[in-house]
Image: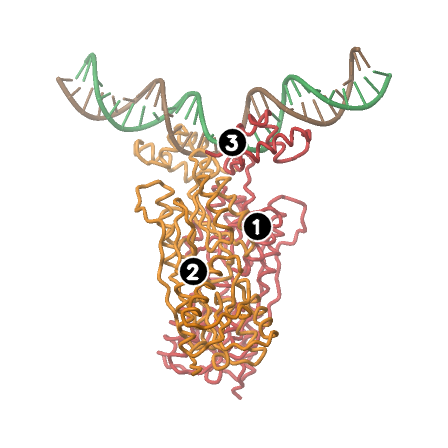
Chain colours: A orange, B red, C brown, D green
Amino acid sequence: MDAKIVDVAAKAGVSPATVSRVLNQASGVTSKTRDKVMKAVDELNYHPNAAAKNLRQQKTMNIGVIAQDINNAYFTEIIKGIENMAYAQKYRVFICDAENQSEKEREYLTMLMDRTMDGVIMIAPQLSDEEICEMADKGYYIAVIGRNIEHPRIPCVYTDNVKFSRQVMEHLLSCGHRDIVFLNGYPEAVDSYERLEGYLKALKDNQIPFHPELVENGDFNETGGYEAMKRLFAKNLHFTAVFAANDEMALGVYQACAERGISIPSQLAVVGVDNNRISKYVTPSLSTVNQPKYTMGAIIVERFIDQMNENQFEDKRVFVVDSELLIRESSNFNMK
Amino acid sequence: MDAKIVDVAAKAGVSPATVSRVLNQASGVTSKTRDKVMKAVDELNYHPNAAAKNLRQQKTMNIGVIAQDINNAYFTEIIKGIENMAYAQKYRVFICDAENQSEKEREYLTMLMDRTMDGVIMIAPQLSDEEICEMADKGYYIAVIGRNIEHPRIPCVYTDNVKFSRQVMEHLLSCGHRDIVFLNGYPEAVDSYERLEGYLKALKDNQIPFHPELVENGDFNETGGYEAMKRLFAKNLHFTAVFAANDEMALGVYQACAERGISIPSQLAVVGVDNNRISKYVTPSLSTVNQPKYTMGAIIVERFIDQMNENQFEDKRVFVVDSELLIRESSNFNMK
DNA sequence: TCCGTAAATGTAATCGATTTCATTAAAATG
DNA sequence: CATTTTAATGAAATCGATTACATTTACGGA
């Protein structure tokens, strides 16, 4: 149906090789033949078949992005940074939504093995370090955002979870809170346990006993946060603050509180993580930890493309970016 | 680097054709040879090269989705519907963010011409009907969400813009509003002018004179809505309600009002469109029009895949889904 | 056991581009 | 103007799978 390179060649009265040269290098061809060829290309509306091109060139100029949940603005803002930087370098960016299912994540990773993508950027992956490293060992190009994976071939950008968790806790403690809930994400996720680690360290630093029952697991989703809160309420524990491992879960906390008639922040302080777009609009506005999401996406793509092209590149593999605690209304209440 | 089919064949002691048969049809092979082949496949960690496969089979099992703004939950919720339905049918879904730039939209459409995708679903496209129809005429598979394009080969799903606009207006009018601002999106966008049409019709039906200066253009973004409001305020007009063509712009209205100390809904009623996830969280909660986004995505994919496979399929091409006016706090105030 | 048929397997063509290598044409040099 | 050098072009191999067609093997019936 579509015109092929031989059709263009025939129409222009040249060989396929010449057509290819015109379209690719644009050097080593007379301007006269170039014009002939371009005319034929236009008239036939010729577009080189990507499969044929990819097969021959052994590359696709495609970058895949595996996001856990495309409905979560944390991911989409990072993706904006990726998309813009990659687009500027003639790469196409394809976004895949793994929907928090590691099975889907794994499935989308096969895009590397079947060479549909030259490289894949994983944002806050669920798969284990081992599994990801194994891929990189096999020579596939992988970059990771939101977590540090110790592998010489995997560029990473992330923020220091432990550090900002402690900041959050210091803030809550300074408001006079002592019984603070930690609302975890998936317990297996690195983000989860690093944030938990910060929580625990802060307690220890301040000689506050740790009550395991104040740690509850969610799934980084609104509903997960909501249900976790309900479980906590059911246990009849005493607590005056909730530190949620991300903003989505904090939204669930809001909802659970609304149902119970608990007012934020006077009865319960809430802090989230991610500075999700939504967080400044909710009432009360949600205290959270901001990460330079767009920048994180842009930074890693630049480094990643260099690596894929085996250019000589600055050898820096790990980028730790600063986060910032944003104290808003949801935690702005002094218990003392 | 990776194993190729000949490697697998050699290792298993069979021909490449047999390997291919095992991996594809799985019939017409002895169970003994199948085992041999699968063993070799596993040992070599063989994954068929997608480019070679696509080239030979003239199809990719890839569906592209072109969204205008991946940060806008309207798009991402539709995409969830697409992704799940397509995934179940062994298609891979690749999401592209056109960032409200028709140039990018056009660029991503070339995925069809170079056969990177078997088909492309455009959500609320910016390109003209003509341009899109032209592609379909050439035989490319295109589906459209959020707008009706009159072309026998383009399946569409959308809601009736004019109808729900009138509903919104009737609601505002019934609250006693007479001077109602219409905050338009891109004026060229079909969604924009259909919603405007509903606005005008409602005015006419109720014998309310139309004041052109009460219509201001935004760009479907928060900042666009914010700036449009500022322009309106600067003109010193009288109005008591704003009907924004989508929720994102309504957020901009909120911000502009906050800066001016105007309270919603007592001084200004606001209604948006899309029932963006964010809209129920803002304060006051935003009245809006809900569309069954997930369903719209799922419905169109099902129909689209049938069409791409030239299966005998129900010939229905156009799906009009119902929308629902959600009256929340932002417009719940009676002026009378 | 032998033969006819069906099932399994192999050989080679094919998809549509790029690219190496060979050839021809043009430009430069003396 | 002849010859060398360089640039432009073409012919054919190549990428790695699938698949049409040819061939071999297995099976069943007489």
Measuring 50% from the left and 45% from the top, which residue is drawn there? B112
Q: Is residue B253 above or below residue A158?
A: below
Q: Secondary structure at mark 1?
A: helix
The residue tagged 1 is A103
* Coordinates of residue B87 in the picture (x, y in percent): 59, 50
Does residue A210 appear left or right of residue C26 in this picture?
Answer: right
Q: Is residue A204 above or below residue C9?
A: below
> Which kind of residue does numbered mark 3 sit on?
Lys
On the same chain, marks 1 and 2? The answer is yes
The residue tagged 3 is B4
Q: Chain of mark 1?
A: A
| Residue in front for this viewpoint, A127 or C2 | A127
On the same chain, marks 3 and 2? The answer is no
Q: To which quarter of the image does residue B160 belong?
A: bottom right
| Residue in front for this viewpoint, A215 or B296 | A215
Q: To which quarter of the image does residue D25 belong?
A: top right
Measuring 41% from the left and 67% from the top, which residue is drawn there? A166
* Coordinates of residue A199 in the picture (x, y in percent): 45, 67
Q: To which quarter of the image does residue D5 belong?
A: top left
Q: Chain of mark 2?
A: A
The residue tagged 2 is A77
> Which kind of residue does numbered mark 1 sit on?
Glu
